[in-house]
């Protein structure tokens, strides 16, 4: 009787814990709309060809203060690009899926300082995306911010 109950308990454990196996990798897991860590921007990430890109679709205070003009890329080092609107601007490019819920080899543009940084992404659950921006070639000299998925 004791052997039967031990076998039953082991079988129940296997069935229970077997249902908690991690999800298979999903390269498209980052596709969607994300709220930045400062909650001032929303970025839509989508697949383009074999990589992923992101564009700004919403900003807090979309218009320049005291005007009806949209915020522009005024910090861009290229003077010709300083008048382009930030809304619908592609700021994240070339993100390639590496497996294990990691995307890398891409870049991210920060309109707040006009610089482009290297970028890695990691899913930390279905609704948290860790965005690691770094000086090109120097991953250790960067910052990681968590973005939250919007529904």
Image (cartoon, rainbow, N blue to C red):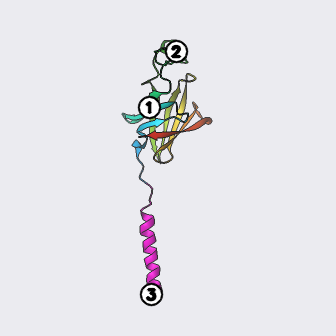
Relative to 147, say whether 40 is above or below.
above
Q: Which residue is mark 2?
A: 66
Mark positioned earlier in the residue sequence (3 or 2): 3
SS at badge 3: loop
SS at badge 1: strand
Total numbered badges shown on the rendered structure: 3
Which residue is drawn at the image coordinates 47% and 44% (left, top)? 127
The quarter in which the C terminus is drawn is top left
In the image, is residue 8 part of the stretch drawn in magenta? yes
Cα distance in 3D space between marks 3 and 1:
61 Å
**Label 2: few (<14), some (14–19) or many (≥20) C-alpha neighbours in 10 Å:** few
Q: Residue furthest bottom?
A: 1
Q: Which residues are magenta?
A: 1-22
Q: Which residue is mark 3?
A: 1
Q: Nearer the viewer, residue 150 or 52?
A: 150
Mark positioned earlier in the residue sequence (1 or 2): 1
Cα distance in 3D space between marks 1 and 2:
29 Å
Question: Main SS type for the magenta part?
Answer: helix
In the image, is residue 109 part of the stretch drawn in magenta? no
Q: Which residue is mark 1?
A: 54
Which residue is drawn at the image coordinates 42% and 43% (left, top)? 29
Cα distance in 3D space between marks 3 and 2:
82 Å
SS at badge 2: loop
């Amino acid at each position: 009787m004791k052997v039967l109950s031990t076998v039953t308990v082991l079988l129940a454990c296997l069935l229970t814990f077997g249902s908690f196996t991690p999800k298979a990798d999903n390269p498209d897991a980052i596709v969607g709309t994300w709220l930045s860590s400062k909650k001032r921007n929303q970025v839509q990430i989508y697949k383009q060809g074999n990589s992923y890109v992101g564009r700004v679709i919403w900003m807090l205070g979309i218009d320049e203060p005291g005007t009806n003009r949209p915020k522009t890329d005024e910090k861009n080092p290229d003077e010709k690009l300083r008048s382009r609107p930030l809304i619908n601007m592609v700021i994240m490019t070339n993100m390639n899926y590496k497996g294990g819920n990691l995307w890398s080899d891409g870049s991210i543009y920060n309109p707040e300082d006009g610089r482009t940084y290297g970028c890695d992404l990691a899913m930390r659950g279905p609704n948290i995306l860790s965005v690691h921006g770094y000086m090109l070639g120097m991953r250790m000299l960067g910052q990681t911010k968590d973005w939250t998925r919007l529904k």
